[in-house]
Image (cartoon, rainbow, N blue to C red):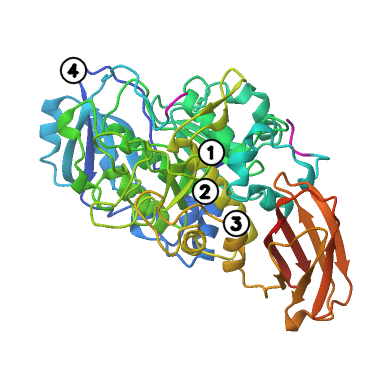
Amino acid sequence: MLTAKSKAIFCFFIFLSFQGLAQTNLYFVTFTDKSASDYSLNAPEEFLSAKAIARRKVQDIQIQEEDLPVNKNYLDSLNKLGITIKGSSRWQNGVIAETSQQVSEELSKKKFVKSVKYLQPAEAASNPLSLSSVSSTIHRQSTSPSSIDYGPSLTQNAMIGVPAIHALGYSGTGKLIAVLDNGFLNANTLTFFNHLFQNGKVIGTYDFVSGEENVYDDGNHGVNVLSVLAGFEEGKIVGPAYDASFLLLRTENDFSETILEEYNWLMAAEYSDSAGVDIISSSLGYNTFDFPEQDHTYTDLDGKTTVVTKAAETAFSKGMIIVNSAGNEGNKSWKYVTAPADGPSVLTIGAVNSAEKYAAFSSVGPSADGRIKPDLTAMGAGVYAGNPDNSFSNTNGTSFSCPLVAGLVACLWQARPELSNKEITDALKKTASKAESPDFQYGFGIPNFEKAIAFSSADTLIAGLFPNPVTVPGDVKLIIANELVSNDVQAELFDLTGKKIFAETFFKAEKINQIRFPGDIQRGVYFLVLNSQSGHQVIRIILQ
């Protein structure tokens, strides 16, 4: 958990005790300015963590006035009116306020108040809704990356090259991921999350719905999502980023669907920013609500209109990568992606089945202003996921293609820490399966880790391979880059499970080197991992 000192920096979020006002509503109150602030842009450590400041610095992002907490004097003025402040937003310069309609009308006349927007009755609730899903061990320790047993989760991982990532030693280490969902029921007791809790990988939690730190008493969906992203129980489930660190944040209320949840998402994104999060994984989306007057129209999906999309775009501008599910509206009347998946900077993830074919439920593009959406696709039909009762099942939804790609992002960024958020997302899109012909079902297609890491690499490519496919038994030529001739080059062959099949080291490599694959190697797709003093390279090879 975050220390008391760390929590103090999240001064943008203020939760006061319930004052029991009769017939109260929730409003978003926007202030006119941040003048006479208690904080200074010259002392960002007073409102941002060291990790948040470092993330901005490495990407050359300036700290701006919108990063400052809201004006304390304005908060005091609201308190004096008997208004309960439920939360505040630096980026939108406002607060969620609980008060009566009469007081809200008086408040709108204050000089420091720019606007007062009605959100919902304070105690609004309805029947539980379905989120963007359609239902149907210890940290590795002595386990080597080349011997991970993915169990039934192999197919969803292999589709995007996760075994090759793990074989290279990348599993999200050092990256901080915020997961925004409906809660994480029993997550702290489940065996497939033991590695997270026993190794201190869950560094913070917050429930923006209930206003408390406990996120473990609500939400099947969050457990499903987190298991796909970061579960680790060999022979059962392995997530791409099982060694990353996490913030677990509840923003979604299963018993209502109102615009308030977009503000919860906004505040969670700001919480993530302050904590120094690298990646936000959000399997949530918004288009229609319990109160029809709050509904979005398709024209609102233009990347700049909805509260949640503006929050996602601001989060990206602070150096984070936002990975969001496209939504499950593809075979419904709405059809299109939902907010914040319409954001230009949001990495929006659609769904395919195990045969890499478009899943009919997956929301499609374009955005209202004609842009390609989704951006990428991954397996979202029949995904193997963990449940709050420690069982496993196959489930459908872009909710589960999203965390797969979020994990891929974490691993790629671990491998290429010098790159900006935009460079990472561009590398994935420009090397995906449909990069040359993107469409409104697949976007740029299924991401390819080997190509993305090569595309984004500042290292010299080590070698080429000819022929490929290769018939076994048989020889293949490893053609070494001119500048690496006479250097040592190690070649290791891994199968799709991450198991090492073959290894050979070329000491003082020549321009053309022969690799002979014996006849007892099973035919199929493999990854040839090359390592030299200049870096590493992954080549997909077919043995036939």
Sequence order check, earlier mark of 2 and 3: 2
- Residue position for label 3: 449
Image x and y of residue 364, in percent: 33, 46
Disc 3, SS: helix
Q: Residue at x 67, y 36 (%)?
A: 200
- Toward the viewer: 59 or 40? 59
520 vs 291, left or right, is right
Res 79 visible: no
Mark closer to the observer (3, 1): 3
| Residue range corresponding to the magenta coloring | 134-140
Q: How many marks?
A: 4
Mark 4 or mark 2: which is in front? Answer: 2
- Dot 4 falls on a residue whose secondary structure is loop
User: Mark 4 is on which residue type?
Assistant: Gln
Secondary structure of the residue carrying numbered label 2: loop
Q: Which mark is residue 277?
A: 2
Quadrant where the N terminus sits is top right
Q: CA distance from mark 4 to mark 2?
A: 38 Å
Crowd band around label 3 with a 10 angstrom C-alpha radius: few (<14), some (14–19), many (20+): many
Q: In the rendered image, which residue does mark 4 sit on?
A: 23
Q: Position of residue 151 (x, y in %)?
A: 69, 33
- Mark 1 crowdedness (10 Å alpha carbons): few <14, some 14-19, many ≥20: many
Q: Earlier in the sequence, mark 1 or mark 4?
A: 4
Magenta span main SS: loop
Residue occupied by mark 1: 247
Please say if the residues under marks 2 and 1 sit with CB atoms less than 8 Å apart. Answer: yes
Left-right relation of 472 to 448: right
Chain-order first, disc 4 or disc 3: 4
